[in-house]
Image (cartoon, rainbow, N blue to C red):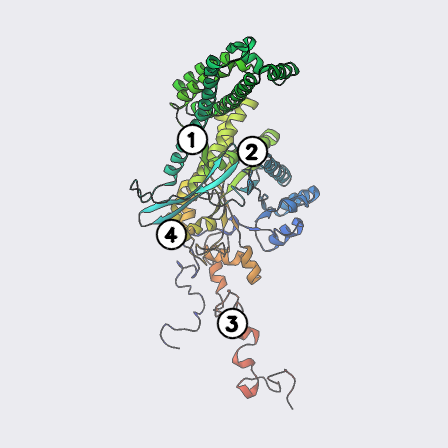
Amino acid sequence: MGGDHQFYGGATDYMKPAEYGESFVGYQEKAGVFGLTTDPRSANQIKAVSDKLNTGAKVVEITAISAELLENIPNQHLDEIRRLKELTGSEITFHGPLVEATGISQQGWDESRREQAERQMWSAVDRSHKIDPKGNIVVTFHTTSGLPEMLTRVKGENGEEAKEMWIIDEREGKFVPIKPKPDYFNNEKNPKPEAELAKLNKENWEKSLSAVNFHAYQGKNALESVENAFERSALPEEVKNEKAFFELYAKAGTPDGQKFMERLRESNPSAAKIAEKMINDITYADIHVRDAYLQLQNLFNQAYSVAESTSDDAARQRLNEYREHIKEKTRNLEDPKHVAELATEVQQGIKLLSTIQPPKVFRPLNEFAMDKASDTFSNVAFSAFKKFKDTAPIISIENPPAGSGLSRGEDIKKLIEETRGKFVKKAHEELGLSEKEARQQAEKLIGVTWDVGHINMIRKYGYNEKDVVKETEKIAPFIKHVHLSDNFGLEHTELPMGMGNVPIKEHLELIKKYNDKAKKIIETGPWYQHFQRSPLPETLAAFGSPIYGMKMAPYWSNVRGLSGGYFSGYGINPDIHHSLYGAGFSGLPVELGGQIAGRSRLSGAPME
């Protein structure tokens, strides 16, 4: 073969020491920082850890991503893993179960589900401490598990655009998507979801006020028709005045009231008909006014919560004044004589609420989920610190694959900040730590597991390599732990590093500025499934890891190609030259030009 079209590349050229092999990612790292994951399908984690240590790995991550599997691991096994760790001088990390920390499901949000997720996480953290009771074992949890991306962002010609936003009605715990459509009437061709949400909240507030006002207006009109009827009615003297008639209405459903109406029907049928109509009108008015008052209370509470959250002292003062005022008017709410007065007060309340900033009945689900997830993670971290103090496990929150909820760098940064803030508040108020001490513990015990393969998948939304690296730049100061897998940005394939387009060199250079001791766990489940090979040699080759501790040749990449094998190491042909396996020409039968006489081409039996 001539030119550049060679059948295979030959052995490593040691005259080019700067090259570490064709899969080299450009970032050299020593072998001791890489770890392997155990089989997530097996509860026999003692054997799983031992098998991984037998490959030469010094770091192993126990993968208990199934809550059911975690329940099948006896505490005695965790103690044995601790002994194995101490015997081999290895390090163990822990991947907790994939549970939904927010409490959100397809049926909506429920606090009891969030609390259940918190208990499952706490079990994982509490039990993982048995493996490293003297240190701070890293325990990884996903930000979300099963939630789709709640703010869908894509990169187009005009930069990043939000295409869809999920919102939640906190009162009901239900959520729906907002997909902005062009508003040609107002000349808005590309409205943003945030603007649509503000518009939705404003319209919802106005409709709610209008509904309350409608009920109050209907009730008041009905009462006015009753008042006018007194002037032209032929009612008996004992119910001729308004006060007396309202007293009759109040006891209309009682035996005394019914007896009075029966006597009136017998003595004055026409007056009885007038009285019955007036009673029906008051009943109608009463129902509407009471309904309006109940709705007003609900709207008042919404407005007050907004004034509280936004620290709007002026609005809060006006609401307080109205509350004290109407309290006097509604003290005898059950007395029908006060219905007309109550209707007037409700209408005044509506006028007041119309001047208040519309409450955010609908919130971005992304924001809501972050709030609930930070509750869960901060509570788990606080419980761990309260029980174990300086040896508490580290709660390391992982980004799920892009396209899942809370998977972007900015989202996770906010989640970590909120989680740490809630931890600090609890530690200061309940344990008496100073804010400085509480902050130090929060920064130590709450961080990020950054999965470089997961974040690379934003490429399917139009982002490029620089955009992927920017995601790491946002989160780098919080990173405690790294998960390594490669892909091409479209699917969750989990190849060994150097086999896809994850810009790992840029990722690790950013991470190293803040944490040069972060362990790097190789997550390549599908790789083993398809090729039945450990990803460790491929990873060491990709990072040009030196075989010896002096950080000099030979490197693992050199060993992978030491014998110049054709397509060596990728599962196509044996790792070393064919001749070593009898596959060269010399190993063929004589009639085919080889040197092996007396052997059949078909069966290998002597030829006759």
**Nearer the camera: disc 3 or disc 2:** 2
Task: Work out whether 461 lies above or below 262.
Answer: below
Please tell me which of labels 3 and 1 falls first in the chain: 1
Q: Which residue is mark 4?
A: 462
**Nearer the camera: disc 2 or disc 1:** 1
Task: Work out whether 237 lies above or below 605.
Answer: above
| Place of residue 49 in the rendered image (x, y in percent of width and height, measured from the top left) | 63, 50
| Kind of residue at disc 3 | His
| Place of residue 159 in the rendered image (x, y in percent of width and height, measured from the top left) | 33, 46
Q: Disc 3 versus disc 4: distance between alpha carbons?
A: 43 Å
Q: Disc 4 versus disc 2: distance between alpha carbons?
A: 36 Å
| Kind of residue at disc 2 | Ala
Please tell me which of labels 3 and 2 falls first in the chain: 2
Q: Disc 3 versus disc 2: distance between alpha carbons?
A: 54 Å
Q: Which residue is mark 2?
A: 381
Q: Disc 2 versus disc 1: distance between alpha carbons?
A: 43 Å
Please tell me which of labels 1 and 4 falls first in the chain: 1
